[in-house]
Image (cartoon, helix red, strand yellow):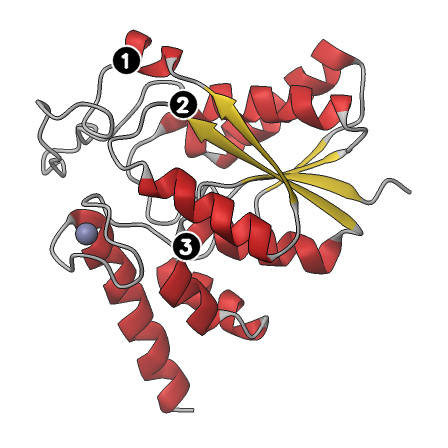
Amino acid sequence: MNKKAVVVFSGGQDSTTCLFWALKEFEEVIAVTFDYNQKHRKEIECATSIAKELGLEHHILDMALLNQLAPNALTRDDIEIKVSKDGSLPSTFVEGRNMLFLTFAGVLAKVKGAKHIVTGVCETDFSGYPDCRDIFIKSLNVTLNLAMDYDFVVHTPLMWIDKAETWALADSFGKLDYIREKTLTCYNGVIGDGCRTCPACILRKKGLDNYLLSRNNK
Ligand SMILES: [Zn+2]
């Protein structure tokens, strides 16, 4: 039984929760972080320090070409971060990003002899990213298997849960405070509870408040 997994790891709340999930599920976990010239270099620093602290093998892959292909608010100062109100994609959207990340994670997994790939994509707070959908993940899993003649299993522990349930999952591992303090989700690059005003911080705080409220009412 192949018990080795590669986790797509950005240093944010979701992927760090997935990392702890994988540490429970698999004997060996390798973290992979993608550097696509994020404005906030802290994302990479955050991922690096968490991986180091957990004693994990950590790869940082250069994906700078992504910005060359699809300029977006995460990499460019001249593009404002906006949440869509009309159902169109937000300005933080990077066309094809998850497809590319997962494909590269697949190549790394095969090279490392790992059968399992773990990603924190989620359809519940669906923000319109087509390559975060479950149907896409299943399709890519088949494609990766055919492309490399290998039996990958792509795991998506967060696919059907919301932000409050993601906090509950972290808490079930005893890692709620760890994730709250050490991860970076904020678009303004503020670690932990963040700037409290950007769309990512608002979503994260709402989920945390809902979870803590339900926990305290138990
Ligand atoms: Zn923020």
Residue 123 visible in the displayed image: no
- Residue located at (25% from left, 64% from top): 205
Mark 3 and mark 1: Cα distance apart in space: 25 Å
Circle number at residue 97: 2
Crowd tier of the residue under label 3, counting other residues whose Cα lies within 10 Å: few below 14, some 14–19, many 20 or above? many
Q: Mark 1 or mark 2, which is nearer the start of the sequence?
A: 1
Q: Is mark 2 within 8 Å of ligand 1?
A: no
On the image, numbered disc 3 is attached to which residue? Answer: 13
Q: In terms of depth relative to the viewer, which is nearer, 109 or 50?
A: 50
Residue corresponding to mark 1: 70
Left or right side of 141 for 4? right
Looking at the picture, which amino acid does disc 2 mark? Arg
The amino acid type of the residue labelled 1 equals Ala
- The answer to whether mark 3 is within 8 Å of ligand 1 is no
Left or right, 169 with respect to 44, comes to right
- Quick one: quadrant of the C terminus? bottom left
The crowding category of the residue bearing disc 2, from other C-alpha atoms within 10 Å (few below 14, some 14 to 19, many at least 20), is some
Q: Earlier in the sequence, mark 3 or mark 1?
A: 3
Please state the horizontal and vertical placement of residue 82, each as a whole percent of the image.
11, 36
Amino acid on which disc 3 is placed: Gln
Q: Secondary structure at mark 3?
A: helix
For the residue labelled by badge 2, is the local secondary structure a helix, a strand or a loop?
Answer: helix
Residue 182 location (% of width, % of height)? 40, 60
Query: Alpha carbon of mark 2 to alpha carbon of mark 1: how far?
Result: 9 Å
In the figure, 12 relative to 146: above or below?
A: below
Circles 2 and 1: CB atoms closer than 8 Å: yes
